[in-house]
Amino acid sequence: MPLLLGLRRRIFVRMAARNVLRRKRQSLMIAAGLMVGTAIVASAEVAGDSMGYAIRRATLDAFELIDETVFLDGYAYYPESVEAKLADDAVLRSATDAIGSNIIWDAAVTDSRTGLYEPSVRLVGFDPEKDKIWGDFRHGGRSFDGTALGPNDAVLNDKVAQKLDARVGDTIVVNTTLPQDPLIPTVQNITGVLNVTVQPGGVIPTLLQDVVGDPYLIRFQVGESAVRVNVFVLWQPAPPARQDLDAELLDPTGRVVASNRNGTLNAPDIPVLLFHNQSIAKPLQPGTWTLRITGEAAARTAFEGNIGTFYAVYSLAELEKRAALLERQFGGVDTSAFTEPPRRTIELRVAEITSGGKGPNFQLPNQLSMYLRMDTTQKLLEREGQINFLKVSNPGGKEDGADRTDEVYPILWERLNATKEGETHPAILALRANNDKQYWLAEADRYGELFGVFLTFVGSFSIIAGLLLIVNIFTMLAEERKVELAMARAVGLKRNHLVQLFTFEGIMYALPAAFIGTFFGLGLAWVLVTGFNRLSDPSTFPPISFRLETDGLVFAFSVGILLTVATVYLGARRASRLNIVSAIRSLDDPPHLRGLRSLVGTALITAAGVVGTLFALATNSFTWQLLGPTALAIGLALILRRFISKNTTYPLVSLGLFAYLVATLFAIEDPQTREADVIGPIRSVVMTLCVVVFVVYSERFTRLLGRLASYLRPLRPVALVAISYPLHKKFRTGMTLAMFSVILLVVMLFSIIGALFFPDVEKESGGYHVEAVSGLSFATLEGRGGDPRVLDGVERYDVLPNFVRFGADLVTVENETTGQFGPPQNTIFGMGPDFAEHNGFTLVRRLAGYATDRDAYRAVASSADLAIVSYEYSTDRDGRDGAHVPGDYLQLRAKGSVKEFQIVGVMEQYHFRGVFLAEPVVHGLFPNTDSLVLFRLKDPADDEAMAKRIEANYKDLGLDANSIRTRVLEENESFRQIFTLIRVFLSLGLIVGILSLGIVTARSVIERRQEIGMMRAVGYLRRHIRRTFLLEMLTVVTLGILIGTAVAILVSYAIWYGQVRELRIPFSIPWAELLTIAGIAYVVTTLSTLSPIFRAARTPPADALRYIE
Amino acid sequence: MAGAADVNGVVVEAKDVAKVYDQGKLKVNALDGVSLEVRAGEMLAVMGPSGCGKTTLLNCLSGLDEITRGEVLVRGRNLHHMKDDERTTFRARSMGFIFQSFNLLPVLSAVENVELPLLVSGHSIRAARKAAEAALTEVGLNHRLNHKPKELSGGEQQRTAIARSIVNNPDLIWADEPTGNLDSNTSKEIVDLLKRLNKERHQTQVIVTHSEEVAKECDRLVRMRNGRIESVQAIRLLRGRHV
C-alpha cells in the first residue's frame, strides 16, 4: 500500500530517499537495528530446520535400511523359524525388499592388551552372508561386509574401541550372562494343610490338624504357558523320623513328574525340594496338579513352604505387574541369588573397527556396540536356533523406504499373525511388529519443529527489544527533524503526509535491512549450529549439519519487513503529532488537548479492561488474567492523568498492576496449561514494563538518587546533570530502559532456569570423585583387585551397602508417597561411622538439636531408627518442595512389616537418590545388598582415568566405576545443551541492547550539544562531560540490569514453583553467573558508547553552543 | 571573583584576533584581525548584522573558541596559551555566561541550575545551595527557587541564567543576545538587571545584541561588519569606578 502511495507522491519518496542518504553513518546504525528482528527470525528458522534435520538424520543413520522390526519386550528369544516363515511368505516377499534377523544382547568386554574394561557393550549377532543386503560396515573411507569374519572374530564400533583403547588384532574377553527366558513365578504359600486344594495366590492360615494317615494331598492350579513348578516344604522342628517322609508331584493326569524320597531329609532343617521343568516351546500341562506328601511323622509336625509356578511372560507390563506382586509378598528378601543367571566368557580377536553403516547397529551416538557372527553369538549365549530381532526393509532407500511403512506395516502384522497359527510357543505368540523408523522420523520432525518454535519464542524477547529499538530510532529521527517536519506542516503537508514520508523512509531502511538481516540470520544460525556442535557432547547428541530451506528464509524476510514497517508506521503516527509552532521554536510540546477521540479511546480501553477482568474472574483464563487487568490499568491511567499529574498517575497505576501480576504469578502452577507457557513470558515482559514506567515517572525518587549521588565528590558536579536528560526525555528513556530490561530479563531468566538444571557438582558429589557400583556385597577393597597400587591415587574410599526397592509405596514419609523422578525406586543406603565422619554431602534441612550436618550423620550412623534422606523424600507425590521436613517419620516396608525412622536431615543432592540408614540396620533388613563405593581422589582432575583404572582393577567385584562429575553432568546433559544454545541465541538480544544504547548515546550527544556547550562554558572540564554521559548511560544500564534481574528472579521462582520443583530440584540463584552477565553488559555497553561520549567531551564549547540541528 | 583590572584598567585585550572556519573548500573569515580592549567595569555592547562575527568574537575573547591568529589577554593572561582544562577552570572562576536560549537544564529546578558552576568548582553541596539561593534572590527569584524552567516565564528563565552567571562572583560577564528570546518589557527588565549587577557588583559585561535598546544602555558600543570592527563609540561616560 505505501508503495502504491509512493507512486502517487513521488516527492515523499524523494524526500525519504534523501533523508536516508543525508547521514550515512546514522542510516547504517538504523539499518543495523532494523536487521536484528529479521536476523532473529531467520536464524531461528534455519537453526530449527538444521536441528530437525540432524535428529532426522540420526534416526535414519540408526535404522539405515530397517523400516519395521519384530521383537519382544526385553529382547526375549524366539525360534529363528519365524524368520524363515516370514521370508517365505509370498505376500510379504512382494511387499518388502528384505527380511533379516539378529541377536541383540549385552556383554562386558575387556581388552587384554590395554587391560581396559567396559561393563556394558551392545552385542550384535549377525549372519554376514544373509546380512549383506543390509549394507556394509564403514570405517575411514573403507567398507566391508563382515563375511571375512572368523568364528572367533569381533567387530568393535569406534566408541568401544576408544573406551578400551583397542586396536585391530587385540584379544578381547567377552563376558555375558546367558539369556534367561522371562519366567515369573506365581507363588502360593502352604502351611500344614492337609487334603486341601490351595488356590493360586491364596494364603491359607496355619491349620495343623492332628490327623494320622496319609497321603496328604495339596492341589494347585497350573495355567497356560507355565514352564516350571518349584515346591519347597520345611518342617520345623524337623520330624524325628525323617526317613518316613516322601513327596511327589503329580500332573493333571496323575503321572508323577517329580519325587523326593527319604534321603533328602538328611538334615533337620533341610526342606523338601521338588522341581519340574518343561521348555517354553513345550509348556506344562495346564490343569490341577497335586503335591502328595506321605509319612506319618509329617502329620504331627507343622510345616510351611510354597509352590512356585513359573510362567513365560513376554509383556513388559505384565512382567512389571507380577514383579510388583512378588515384591509385596517377599519385599526385602533379595531373590537375585536364586535368579542370577549363569555367565559365559569367550576370547575373541578384534578383526575390524567400524564407524557405522549397518542397520541393526542402531548407531546411536553413544551406543557402544560389538558385532559377532550369528553362529558364534548363538553358541556363546547357548541359543542355537534362536534369534531375538527381526528386521524388515521396505522397497526404496533408507529415507523413502519409510514412506511405504503405512502400506507395509499392516501387511507385516497380518502375515506375522498368520505365522502364529498352530504355534504353541508363547514367545512366538507374543511377537509384535513395530513401525520403528516411521515413528522415530515423525518424532524427529516434531522435535525439529518444536525446536524452531522454541528458538523463535526465545528470540521473541529479542524481537520485542528490537521493535522497541525501532520505535526509539524513529522517535529520535522525528525529534531530530522536528523543525523541518514542522516547516513541512507549515507549508501545507498534512499529518498523514508525514506518516507516509516516514513510512517510505522506514521501507527504505527495512528492505535492505531485512535482506541483509536474512543473511545475517543465516550466519547467526551457522554460529549457533557450530557453537552447539562445539559445546555439546557428541556422544549424547548427533552433530548438527547446517541446513538451509528457502521457505524459512522467505518467511524470515517477510516477517522482518512486516515487523519493521508496522513498527515504523506506528512510530510515524506518533512523530506526526507535533505542534508546529513549538517545533519550529524548539520548545517543548504543549500538553495535548484531549478531544472526543481521546475520550472515546479511553472509554473503550477501560471498558475492555473491565470486561476482560470480569471474564478473567469468570473463566480463570490465563490470557484474560493478564489482558483484562492490564487494559483496565491502562484505561485507569488514561482517566486519572486528566486529573492528576502523570508523575503521580503512572507510578501509581504501574505499581498497582505490578502488584497484581506478582500476586497472581504463582497461579502458573498447572503444568498442563500450555496457555501459561505462552502467557507467562508475556506477563513477565508486562511486569518489566510496569517497573520501567514506575522508575521513569518516579521523578522525585530519581532526583533524590541524583541528589544523594552528588554527595560523592567525583560525582558532585555530574550526578544531577546525568539524571536530568533521561528524566526530560521520558519516552526515549522509557523505551531504552524497557528494551534493556527486557533483554536482561530474558538473559537472566534463562540463566537462572538453566542453572537449576545445571547441578552443582560439588554438592552432588559430597566431596567424592568416583562412584563404583557392584552387585556384590563387600565391606572393603582390601585384598581385592589385581593391583593394590591403584588405591595410591585415592585419598579415601567408603563402601555403602545398598538395596534397591521397586515400588512407589514401599517407602513413605508420614505415610504419604514422596516425589519420584522416573520409575518408582527406592535405594536404601547403609552408612558406617567412617562415611558419617568424612562425607561432604550437605544437608539442606536439619532437625533442630543437631548443631552441624556432621552431628546428624553421626547420629544416623549409630542409631537404629534415624535416617537422612536425599532431596526427593522431602517432596510430596506432586513434587512440592518442603512437603516433608526433618522430624517427620519415614516408613520402610520390608519383610512384610513396617519399620519407622525419624528423618533428621534432608540432603541437598539428588544424584544418589535414596534413604541413608545405619549400616547394621540395612544389613539386618536386607541380607543381600549391592555395594556403592565412593572414592575421594588425591587429584580430582584425574577422575576419568581413575574410574577406568578402578574398573579394570576390581573386575573380581564387577565394579562399574564412573566419574561422579561426568555422571552428574550427563544426567543433565540435554538441559545443559539446550540452555547453552539459548545463551548463544540470547546474545542477539544483548546485541540489540548494545546497539540501542550506542544509538541512544550518539543521538543524545548530538541533541545536547548546546547543553554541553553551556556546561563547558560554566566550568565543566572534559572529564566532567565524559563522566556525565557515562554516569547517565550506566544509570540506564544499572536500572535495566536491576529491573531485568529482579523480575527474572521473581518469574523464575514462580516457574520453579509451578513446574520445576516437581523434578526435585531446589531453587537457587546463580549469583556468580548473573554478576558475570551484568559485568559483560556493563563493559560491552560502555565500550559501545565510548566513542560518542569522547566525541562529546572533545567538542569545543563554542562549536557546541553554536550547534543547531 | 571581583579582582582588580590591570594597571591600565583593561580586563580583556584582543590583539589582531582572526578566526577562520575551515569548511572544506570554503574558508570563512569570521574574525579578521580584530583588536579590542574591554575595560574594567564597563558594559560593552557588540552589534552588527547577522554573520558579522559578533558571537565568534565573544567566544574567542571568552576562551570558548580557539583563535586562528592573534592573542587574547584576560587580566594579562594569554587565554589561548592555556591548556583546555586550565582555561576552563580560569573561565569558571572569573567569567559568567548568559545565552540567548537560556540553556537551562529542563528537569533541574532553578536553584539546581544555578548551583552547577559551584558544584563543578568543588564547593560543597550546602555552600552551593546557599550561594545559589542568594544569587536567585539577587535577581528577584527567591520565590521561584524550586520551579523548573518550563514553570518559569522567559524573563524568569533568563534571570535564572543570569543568577547562574553571577553565582561564583565573576567580574566578567559574557552575554550573547540575552534578550533575543524575550519581549520588549521583559528585555527591559533583564537589561535593568544587568545594569544593576554592573553597578552593584562592579562587573565588566560584554553584551552581544541586535537591539539598539540594549546597546544604548551600555557604556560603549562596538559595531562589527564582515569580521572586523567597524567602529567603537562611547555611549555613556565611563564612570571609572573600578579603575
Image: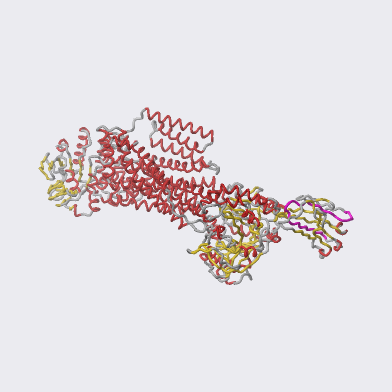
Q: Residue furthest top?
A: A596
Residue B201 lies, in percent from the top left, at 21, 43
| Colour pattern | secondary structure
Q: Which residues are magenta?
A: A210-237
Chief SS of the magenta region:
strand
In which quadrant is the N terminus of chain A drawn?
Answer: top left
In which quadrant is the C terminus of chain A drawn?
Answer: top left
How many numbered marks, from 0 up?
Answer: 0
**Does the image show residue A890?**
no
Q: Is residue A236 magenta?
A: yes
Residue A54 lies, in percent from the top left, at 48, 53
Residue A1011 lies, in percent from the top left, at 27, 44
Above or below, A493 relative to A350: above
Quadrant position of residue A920: bottom right
Q: Is residue A572 left or right of residue B176?
A: right
Q: Is residue A679 left or right of residue B221?
A: right
Above or below, A304 relative to A166: above
Quadrant position of residue A504: top left
**Does the image show residue A928?**
yes
Q: Is residue B156 magenta?
A: no
Quadrant position of residue A727: top left
Residue A875 lies, in percent from the top left, at 60, 49
Nearer-the-camera pick, A988 or A319 = A319
Q: Is residue A504 left or right of residue A652?
A: left
Nearer-the-camera pick, B30 or A436 = A436
